[in-house]
Every structure is written in C-alpha cells, then in structure tokens.
C-alpha cells in the first residue's frame, strides 16, 4: 500500500515539473483566529498569484494539523511550482520538508517555518514595538505613570513563531518605559479563549487594570467585551486593522491597531516566487532562524489617522 502510494506520488511529481511550474500551492492556517486569512489574504494571494501568471490552489487547514498535512500531500501530488505556506502549530515544517525533497521552493508566508527557502512577512518585532508604544501613549493620555500602571500582558499562540516576535517587540518598549506586567496571560490565537483567560486575569488583579497588551484585534475584541461588562475603558492594543478592530479604535475602546496591508504582503510573496522560479537568489538584510526574511513595514493606525484619511 505504502509502496503504491509512494510510486503514485513519484509518478505524479515526476511529470509535474513542466506542467505545474506555474501552479502555486497555498495553505492557510484557519478561518477564525483573526479576521484576515479568508477575507484578507485569500483574495489578495489569489489576485497577486494569478496576475503574475500562476494558477492558485489555495486551501485552508481549518485549525487542524492533520488536515494541514493531508492538504500538503494532495497539493504536492497534483504538482506545485512553488508553495506558500502559512504555518499552523508547526504543521508547515514537514510539508516544507516534503516540498523541498521534490524540488519545490517554499515561501513561508506571514509566519516563520523552519527549513523554508524564504520568509515573507511584516517586521514582526516592529509590530510588537508599535503595540508597546500604543499602550504607553494610552497610559500617557490617561495620566497614568507607566512605572506603577497595572498592565496585563497577553500574547498570541506560542506555537506561531510570530507571537514571540510580537511579544519581544512590545516588551522591549514597555520595559524600557518602566512597565512591568501586573499579570501575564497564556498565549493564544483563539479569541474566545483569550476572553476566558482575560476574565481570570481580571479577577487575579482584583479588577485593577490600567491597560491591556493584546496581540491582535480578534483577541482584543474578546478582552474589550469583558472590560465593557465591568464598565472599564482602558488602552488596549491590537493588530490587523480588521473591521471589528477599527470599530473598536473609533469607539475609543482600543487605542490603535497595526495595519499590515495584505495586498502588499501577497504581491511581495508572488514577486519573490517568480524570482526563485527564474533561478534567481534574492538576498535580504534580515533572516529568521537562518531563513532569508523579507520584512515589510507595518503601520500603526490610531483613530486620528483613520479620521484624517476620511476628512481630507
Ligand atoms: C499574524 C496576525 C494574525 C495572527 C492570528 C499571526 O501570525 O501575523 O496577523 O492576527 O497570526 O491569525
């Protein structure tokens, strides 16, 4: 059985090289950890890849590492000229390894993947620094001393390499200003879980909360719901410039969000894929665990910025 499958795979990939060199295989991680992968990245990748002359096969692993591996096998046996993988809890590593065995170049898209050829993302430490700065600006506006403020620290899923970079950037900025964590929540990208964890944190600090470092708009929304329930409005950070996040920013419930334009990220990944397939070896200033890293610039987005764009 295994031998038959292996032969079938070899057979298909053997003839795949020519006919599929313009087929781009993409795996997205989930449909609910944020508001970006399906509504944002999928259409952005689809158009960046098809405009660049690729056929785009975009699948979503639906928060399931087994499904992630199955999609990877299916895509590779159909044939891929290039793979763009958004990791989900480490599942991208073995798909990347299989792709490379078959000579298919791998671009880690947005999240780092060990063993990928390239990593295209935003500068994730800068994302974190912008989040830290939002908290400091919010505390200053509320007249709170950062050194004595009660700030709850929360972060994304530790299995996502980005989460550690966001947290490092934020912590560097906050600690430099004298902020220490009043409570550190367990990391997650599950918005509902972030709400439960925040409820526990809120109880642990007896409701004494001056600000909350939140890793993205989705987690921030759940945290804000608990703050609302307790009649509190304090600076909360975020990321993704999602519709819900921007609404919270305009309502004054979230200090700001970090805007990371999907179209720019998708276009950069498609351009890089073309260069790699042409046999070029682009180099980048940064690297992440030895993987060359194209780090795009994120944009801090406050209510003032949104309003200034509307009232021109
Ligand atoms: C992405 C964020 C996203 C989060 C949850 C991170 O890796 O960079 O934009 O909010 O995952 O999906």
Image (tube, rainbow, N blue to C red):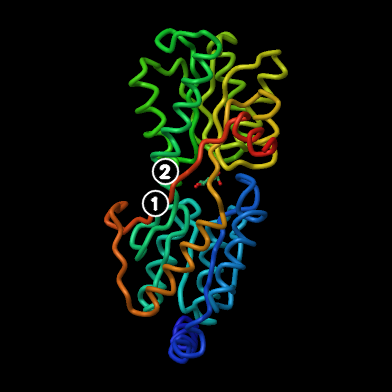
36 relative to 299, above or below:
below
Pointer 1 local density, CA inside 10 Å: few below 14, some 14–19, many at least 20: many
In percent of width and height, residue 159 lies at 44, 45
Residue occupying the point 56% across, 67% down = 48
* Residue ID at (31%, 67%): 282
Q: Are marks 2 and 1 in contact (CB under 8 Å)?
A: yes
Q: How many marks on residues?
A: 2
Closer to the camera, 196 or 120? 120
Q: Which residue is mark 1?
A: 295
Residue 178 higher or lower than 29, as above or below? above
For label 1, the SS is strand
Residue 153: percent from the left, percent from the top? 47, 24
Q: Which residue is painted at 46% across and 20% down in the image?
A: 136
Q: Quadrant of the C terminus?
A: top right
Residue at the spot 52% in from the left edge and 35% down from the top edge: 215
As rendered, which of 172 and 77 lies closer to the eye? 172
Mark 2: give few (<14), some (14-19) or many (20+) Cα within 10 Å.
many
Q: Position of residue 217 (x, y in %)?
A: 60, 36
Q: CA distance from mark 2 to mark 1?
A: 8 Å
Mark 2 and ligand 1: say if the CB distance to the nearest ligand atom is below 8 Å: yes
Quadrant of residue 247 in the image?
top right
- Mark 2, secondary structure of its residue: helix
What residue occupies the far front of the structure in this picture? 312
> Does 309 sit above or below residue 100?
above
Residue for badge 2: 124
Task: Please identify, in this view, whether the residue under mark 2 or under mark 1 is nearer the observer.
Answer: 1
Mark 1 beta carbon near ligand 1 (under 8 Å): no
Q: Which mark is residue 99?
A: none
Compared with 167, 92 (above or below) is: below
């Amino acid at each position: 059985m295994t031998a038959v499958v292996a032969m079938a795979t070899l057979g298909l990939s053997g003839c795949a090289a020519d006919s599929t060199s313009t087929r781009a295989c993409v795996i997205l991680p989930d449909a609910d950890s944020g508001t970006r992968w399906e509504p944002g990245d999928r259409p952005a990748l689809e158009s960046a890849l098809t405009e660049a002359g690729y056929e785009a096969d975009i699948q979503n692993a639906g928060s399931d590492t087994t499904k992630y591996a199955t999609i990877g096998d299916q895509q590779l046996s159909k044939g891929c000229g290039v793979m763009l993988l958004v990791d989900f809890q480490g599942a991208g590593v073995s798909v990347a390894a299989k792709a490379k065995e078959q000579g298919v170049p791998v671009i880690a898209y947005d999240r780092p993947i060990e063993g990928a050829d390239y990593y295209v993302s935003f500068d994730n430490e800068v994302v974190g620094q912008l989040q830290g700065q939002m908290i400091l600006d919010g505390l200053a506006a509320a007249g709170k001393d950062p050194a004595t403020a009660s700030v709850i620290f929360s972060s994304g899923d530790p299995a996502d390499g980005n989460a550690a970079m966001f947290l490092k950037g934020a912590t560097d900025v906050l600690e430099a200003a004298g902020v220490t964590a009043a409570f550190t929540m367990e990391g997650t990208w599950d918005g509902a879980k972030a709400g439960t964890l925040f409820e526990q944190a809120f109880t642990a600090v007896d409701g004494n909360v001056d600000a909350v470092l939140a890793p993205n708009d989705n987690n921030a929304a759940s945290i804000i719901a608990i703050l609302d329930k307790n009649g509190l409005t304090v600076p909360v950070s975020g990321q993704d410039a999602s519709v819900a996040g921007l609404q919270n920013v305009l309502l004054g419930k979230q200090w700001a969000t970090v805007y990371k334009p999907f179209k720019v990220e998708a276009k950069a990944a498609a351009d890089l894929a073309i260069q790699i397939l042409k046999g070029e070896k682009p180099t980048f200033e940064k690297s992440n665990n030895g993987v060359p890293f194209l780090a795009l610039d994120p944009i801090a987005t406050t209510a003032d910025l949104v309003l200034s764009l509307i009232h021109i």
